[in-house]
């Protein structure tokens, strides 16, 4: 029986490998991520995540920022494992939601004891930690939290209008299926569909794509089904 599922985030492949092998030998399941954006996506995706081991010094988004963003939607325990040893670094880590801190190079026994202590503390006093329900992952960087009615890109909230979110929500409710223009208009705007309504939908979909797509000329999330409507693939 697994002792818990742990996500290891470090841009150093050797560290990811060493920690993963150590934890698996002790009965833990492990996942890995090489950067901050990948870490945020995996926290959103993994519904039974028990612990996050997080480096600070990573290219792009550092571990402090990753922790800050994850705390907006998850209470998963965060153990910082980093070469940064200054008191200011530790203060920043704890202030942004970190639960414990180990400096590299680390003692394996110390790491295992801290992991065991963190998991016991959170499971006993806060219950099993979970990401909030209702998360839909749309791409490597984009996710929608249906419970909170927000969309995020690389962990940052996207400023969608009510109509843009309604379009996105309607397509997600029918994910994998084509939503006809007529049905989309009635769901988002109400009233009867007319030829001019198709242009209104097209303008709002274009604005939505500008905010969530990597390439609006070749959209990978909201796809056009010519002559019919729009679709988000499963």
Image (cartoon, helix red, strand yellow):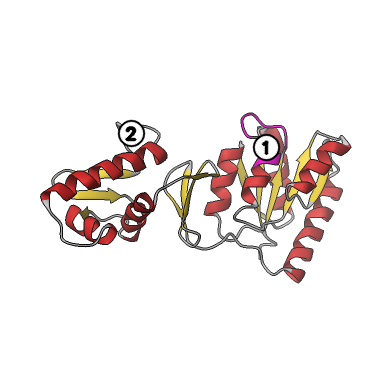
Establish if 161 lies above or below 15.
below
Assign the N terminus to one quadrant of the image: bottom right
Q: Is residue 65 visible?
A: yes
Compare residues 60 and 20 and report the one nearer the observer: 60
Residue at (19, 55) in percent of width and height: 180
Determine whether 154 is above or below 52 in the image. Answer: above
Tell me the residue at 58%/45% (across/down): 40
Label 2 packing within 10 angstroms: few (<14), some (14-19), many (20+) = some
* Depth order, front residue of 73/122: 73
Q: Residue at x 60, y 44 (%)?
A: 39
**Is 160 situated left or right of 67 in this image?**
left
* Residue 91 coordinates in the image, percent (x, y): 83, 43
Residue 174 x/y as whole percent: 30, 59
Q: Is residue 59 magenta?
A: yes
The residue beneath circle 2 is 216
Of tags 2 and 1, which is closer to the observer? Answer: 2
- Which type of secondary structure does the marked residue at label 1 adopt? loop
Q: How many marks?
A: 2
Residue 77 vs residue 150, the one in the foreground: 150
Magenta residues span 56-65
Q: Is residue 234 visible?
A: no
105 vs 26, left or right, is right
Q: Mark 1 highlights which residue? A: 10
How many residues crowd mark 1 within 10 Å: few (<14), some (14–19), many (20+)?
many
């Amino acid at each position: 029986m697994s002792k818990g599922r742990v996500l290891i985030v470090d841009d150093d492949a050797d560290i990811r490998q060493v920690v993963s092998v150590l934890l698996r030998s002790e009965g833990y399941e492990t996942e890995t991520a090489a950067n901050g954006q990948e870490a945020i996506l995996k926290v959103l995706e993994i519904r039974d995540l028990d612990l996050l081991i997080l480096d600070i010094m990573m290219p792009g988004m550092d571990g402090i920022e990753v922790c800050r963003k994850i705390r907006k939607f998850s209470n998963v325990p965060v153990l910082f494992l980093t070469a940064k040893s200054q008191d200011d670094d530790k203060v920043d880590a704890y202030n942004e939601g970190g639960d414990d801190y180990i400096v590299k190079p680390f003692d394996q026994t110390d790491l295992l004891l801290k992991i065991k202590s963190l998991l016991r503390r959170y499971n006993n006093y806060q219950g099993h930690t979970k990401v909030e329900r209702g998360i839909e992952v749309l791409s490597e960087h984009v996710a929608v939290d249906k419970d909170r009615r927000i969309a995020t890109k690389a962990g940052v909230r996207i400023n969608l209008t009510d109509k843009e979110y309604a379009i996105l929500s309607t397509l997600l409710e029918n994910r994998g299926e084509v939503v006809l223009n007529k049905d989309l208009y009635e769901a988002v705007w109400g009233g009867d569909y007319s030829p001019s309504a198709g242009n209104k939908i097209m303008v709002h979909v274009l604005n939505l794509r500008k905010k969530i797509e990597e390439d609006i000329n070749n959209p990978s999330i909201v796809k056009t089904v010519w002559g019919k409507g729009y679709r988000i693939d499963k």
